[in-house]
Amino acid sequence: MNGHLADHERDKGVEHMKAHRFLAVAAAAAMAVTLAACGTSGPGSSDGGQTLNLWYLSDNPTVPDAAKRFEAANPGWKVNLTDTPNDQYKTKLRVGLGTANGPDVFFNWGGSDLIEYKKSNLIVSVDDLMEQKKLADVFGPAVLQQGQVDGTQYALATAVEASMVWYNKEIFDKLGLSAPTTWEQFLDVIAKTKAGGYTPIAMANASQWPGSQWWSELVALSCGPDFWATLGTADPKIRLDDPCVVDAHQKLVDLVKAGAFNKGFNGLDYDKGESRQLFWSGKAAMNHMGNWTLTSAKEEAPEMMSKMDFFTVPAWSGAKGTSDMMTGGLAPMYSVAATSKSPDKAKELLYYLVNEDSAKDITKLGRVPVYKGTEITDPLVKKVSDAITAAPALAPWPDHVLEPEWTTEMLQDTQSLFGLSLSPQEAAAKMQAKYEQVHK
């Protein structure tokens, strides 16, 4: 699939995700600060430059193997690994990047963050690595663009991710259900799983970003690809208080009122697995989340691999989007910190994180690699890959690619929608007001 991903993104409308500076490198997708785990030497270290600090998300167990391959090829060099859960990582990186004890190489989501890193001189170009390793031959143009700022390469991606609704096939079979293809069928599945004694959809939204994935998907379905195409330009085609946005908000509220989610979901922590465990245990019939759910299943509940399947969130009558649209992006992405005392070695370490060997490891996790020619043998991973390839549009996860001030408002308002403390119209008005403030 990987050779086709770049063509798919280029030919099927990746431009709709790159219409302004905050979507120019968009594609993401989302993850206790233990400073001692960084080691004491800091970037490049004080021991003659023989140590590199690598910061990454703890949901990617392929990183240690990549680091070992780097160390084997570079005798005398040591990689200090620091793995951190999603939300704690965001805080850790915000505090530590650019400091003496910060990373040499670090995971990031690209997008507006990458632009800000570049503006603040926190990262260095990897154009020389691109040329040295001929990476333009193994990563398609659209994939590479996601790690560029003003045409210069500052990050390299390893996989493409997207969100979908995972479901337990045994529960569906027991209740005589099939994967829904329309919104009405989706509501029927929710009603029947609830009547059968199950939580329809597992949810943990204390950190707000899981709810933002619902928001992004529903708005993209309701408003169509044009919503993302001009968001943030001087003349956006679709305002945040447009009726199509309000309709998406109403669909979200409809899910809550239908009892689609477990009680107290707005206070549960995704990083602690409080939604996944409902799904793994068979108490919840469905779980809406990215395809890294496969990685979690392999590690936490391998018996689920034979019980799981997925469907995309279905559209409804009057929606401008189609049910085969998806929300997602490229991740993990890696960059080299400007504070590294050994930038050339740091770039070589970055290469080991994204090369062919790592791409093969990533497929074993259930991720879809972007390194051209990587074979995908797992049928469920192949199904995810095919769904992403076939998607006519891949809307970005908003919290990865939009301005922080606006993103904070969106996350709070979306959580309030889930909590039924804001009406669909009120949430739309608040988002539009913040948007105008940020873009004035």
Image (cartoon, rainbow, N blue to C red):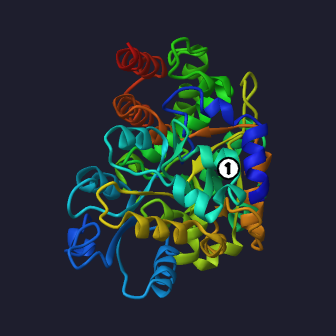
Relative to 434, is 347 above or below?
Answer: below
Quadrant location of residue 439?
top left
The residue at 40%/51% (across/down) is: 124
Q: Residues within 10 Å of mark 1 (few under 14, many from 20)?
A: some
Q: Is 440 situated above or below 198?
A: above
Residue 407 quadrant: top left
**Horizontal relation, residue 5 to residue 108: left or right:** right
Q: Position of residue 143 (x, y in %)?
A: 64, 49
Whether residue 312 is visible, yes or no, is yes
Q: Residue at x 61, y 33 (%)?
A: 17
Residue at image mark 1: 192
Q: Nearer the viewer, residue 276 or 42?
A: 42
Residue lying at 72% horizontally and 42% vertically, measured from the top left: 9
Q: Is residue 379 left or right of residue 438?
A: right
The quadrant holding residue 14 is top right
x, y percent for residue 102: 26, 61
In front of the other: 234 or 272:
234
Mark 1 element type:
helix
Identify the amino acid type marked 1. Lys
Out of 354 and 338, give the one closest to the viewer. 338
Q: Could you tell me if residue 178 is visible in this image?
A: no
Q: Residue 385 in the image: x percent, y percent? A: 74, 58
- Residue shown at the point (65%, 30%) measured from the top left: 16
